Amino acid sequence: MENEWQLFLNYFCDTYLAGYSDYQVLIKTMYKNGNDPKLIIPTNKLTEDETFQKTFSKIKIDNVKTEMYSKIAEKLGDKYRDRCEKLTGKTKGKAITLLEIIEVLFQKFQDSKKNQDKNIFPIDNLHITKLQADLKDLNYEAQIREFKAFLSENFNQSIGAFLIHGKDKYGQRWLVNRLIFNLPYWSMGEKFPICLKKHRHEINRVWETLQWKFGSTSSSPEDVITAIYERWEKEPVILCFDNVNEYKVRGDYLRNLISQFWQPLAKKAISDKFYSKYPLILFLIDREGCPDDLDIELLNSFDINKAHVPVKLTELLRFKESEIGLWVKNKDTLFNPILSDMNLEKFIALLVQCNNDDNKTPEDVLDQICGQFTTSDNLSLTWKHFEKTLPL
């Protein structure tokens, strides 16, 4: 029972509490202390308020904000509508409590562990690879077309920087990782993501991070550039600066990164007559869809004479309804094992509804798709789990 409860707490935290740091701290505290009998809730005691409240008082659960309760209850209602209706009926229309949320989710977790849910299909690494391959055919055609045009014009020397921009959770990282699959020799060497949000208060920390990643003799921009250039001579160098939209990053900070780092590096690589055959690529990720507010020079299309200037790809938008239906129907080998023709139409309608909801994002649609499968340990596959496998 202890191992099952620990697994559930970890699953609960990853699946339902993403973004709610207060909750994560509390649940992870329980998870880490799972071997303490006082912090274990036996199955036959799960529904008893007294036991539950006593357990959670150990970590001051009562101090968690009411807003977080409601948001998780909303997620619960979206995913397990029938169970929530029964729950609401039992409570005569009262708001769902945290105890009731835990009760439903824990039962769902146990059902999944026993593989009783016939609409969920266990997925192994081979199927995850297929799912990843099939998802590459969904949306983002404009951006991929623009990137391929750049590659076709510069197949001998793929050197360039690209801005990926759109509203938050519109699939920025997913697009970056789809783009790199088109690069020659992309699987060789390391990919280097740097979250500028973590370094927004001090640009020198970026140089120090690059020094560590590339083994530079110092953190000066000149030495870092030399180290990266020497690496590029031997293998591809694919960099990604995430969160360039941060208030303390846009403007002077970002301009300095480009003028002191990317531009001299790109110009050196382009001018070298003994250029490398490997790609040298920089991605900039904007999670607010504010390219005009970044206050940097951007091109609308690649110019070989200005390879040191980042290119602004087409803005990331929601999926098209027709595209969702066509994609699902074309992926018969992916969905046939788990969905009948009737359920396939319902699934398409569910994805379209999610896509058209103003409170949802394209990544919520991807999460709905992933949610049709379970992992090898019988936990529902989520987009967050899937995203962790991406190299950038």
Image (tube, rainbow, N blue to C red):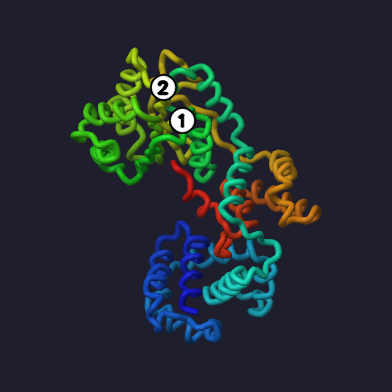
> Which three-letter amino acid code belongs to the residue tagged 2?
Lys
The quarter in which the C terminus is drawn is top left
**Residue at the spot of label 1:** 185
Residue 361, given in percent of the width and then of the height, sits at 58, 47
Question: Could you say which is closer to the camera, residue 196 or residue 228?
Answer: 228
At label 1, counting other C-alpha atoms closer than 10 Å, the crowd grade (few under 14, some 14-19, many 20 or more) is some
382 over 35 or under it: above or below: above
For image coordinates 59% across by 29% down, the residue present is: 142
* Depth check, front residue: 40 or 58: 40
Q: Position of residue 364 (x, y in %)?
A: 58, 51
Q: For residue 293, what is the image quadrant?
A: top left
SS for dot 1:
loop
Q: On the image, numbered disc 2 is attached to which residue?
A: 277
Residue extending farthest to the right is 342
Residue 204 appears in which quarter of the rendering?
Answer: top left
Question: Does residue 215 show up?
Answer: yes
- Whole-percent x and y of residue 61? 42, 74
Vertically, is 263 above or below 124? Answer: above
User: Is 188 placed above or below 391 here?
Assistant: above
- Give the vertical position of 350 relative to 329 (above or below): below
- Residue located at (61% from left, 46% from top): 130
Contact flag, marks 2 and 1 (Cβ < 8 Å): yes
Residue beneath the point at 67% across and 66% down: 81
Question: Does residue 200 appear to the left or right of 19 in the view shown?
Answer: left
Q: Name which residue type carries label 1.
A: Tyr
Instruction: Please give the label number shown on residue 347.
Output: none
